[in-house]
Amino acid sequence: FKLENKKDYIINLEGFGEKSFNNLIASINTSREIALHRFIYSLGIPEVGESTARNLESHFEKFKGIFEATYDELIEVKDIGPKVAENIIQFFQNPLIVEMVPKLLEEIALQELSKEDFKDMPLRGKQIVLTGKLENYSRDELKEILIRMGANVTSSVSSKTSLVIAGDKAGSKLKKAESLGIKKLVFDKSGYKFHGRIKAIADELRSKGLNF
């Protein structure tokens, strides 16, 4: 984030010039806006992956809450146990991190959650499993859409699963969901066409009777 102060040095490097330098600075400035969960994930806290970072974001809403969280507060977060809670506390008690984080926050525009954001998260806190070949969306695309709606997308079916979205050749996961009486959304052969917008997708789920 401080490369702009090194312009004279950088534009004299091989392969760099004024235009390349400006493009680099523009790219850096674009990256200054970052969602809270992506920021937490990027810090490299041991055993805190993308899913855990999203859970922290959803639970605390603000970075300050995560930074100052106690052990008892952390283990209340979904899917966080004693080991991960200890990792988070130790990470934010590290003197180097304590010194670095305020300086880093000065350089970025952290996108934190507000209560208004939850209006667009109709699946907040629900566990959803994707299985089989899904038409119209790749698995990663649909996973990202569901996560943005607040869902926790998991790889296995359990009694805690809220919904299974199944495509062609769904196999054992769909059978297990049926045996457990879990709600399911099955794509037919022509492909169940989700709309592109997040709210529209929520409406599609509700139109199938999948109210949570």
Image (cartoon, rainbow, N blue to C red):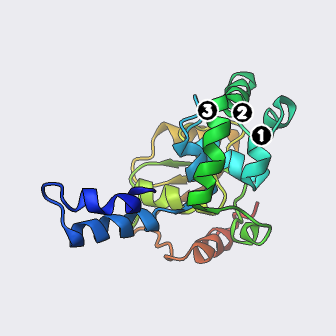
Numbered circle sitting on residue 96: 3
Q: Position of residue 59 (x, y in %)?
A: 77, 49
Q: CA distance from mark 1 to mark 2?
A: 6 Å
Binning the other alpha carbons within 10 Å of mark 1 as few (below 14), some (14 to 19) or many (20 upward) gives: some
Q: Nearer the viewer, mark 3 or mark 1?
A: 3
Question: What residue is shown at x 72% (from left), y 33% (from top)?
Answer: 80
Q: Nearer the viewer, mark 3 or mark 2?
A: 3
Amino acid type of the residue that numbered disc 3 sits on in the rendered structure? Leu
Question: Is there any visible trace of residue 50 in the rendered image?
Answer: no
Q: Position of residue 92 (x, y in %)?
A: 69, 34
Q: Position of residue 75 (x, y in %)?
A: 80, 32
Residue at the limit of the structure toward the right, as seen here: 72
Q: Secondary structure at mark 3?
A: helix
Residue 2 lies left or right of residue 100; in this view the side is: left
Numbered circle sitting on residue 77: 1
Quarter of the image with the C terminus in it: bottom right
Question: What residue is shown at x 51% (from left), y 62% (from top)?
Answer: 32
**Residue on which disc 2 sits:** 80
Q: Secondary structure at mark 1?
A: loop
Q: Nearer the viewer, residue 185 or 82?
A: 82
Residue 42 lies left or right of residue 18; in this view the side is: right
User: If you read the primary sequence from the N terminus, does the residue marked by circle 3 or circle 1 appear first?
Assistant: 1
Question: Is there any visible trace of residue 101 in the rendered image?
Answer: yes
Question: What residue is shown at x 39% (from left), y 63% (from top)?
Answer: 4
Q: Position of residue 94 (x, y in %)?
A: 66, 28
Residues tagged 1 and 2 counted as in contact (Cβ below 8 A): yes
Q: Nearer the viewer, residue 49 or 157?
A: 49
User: If you read the primary sequence from the N terminus, does the residue marked by circle 3 or circle 2 appear first?
Assistant: 2
Amino acid type of the residue that numbered disc 2 sits on in the rendered structure? Ile
Question: What residue is shown at x 44% (from left), y 60% (from top)?
Answer: 141
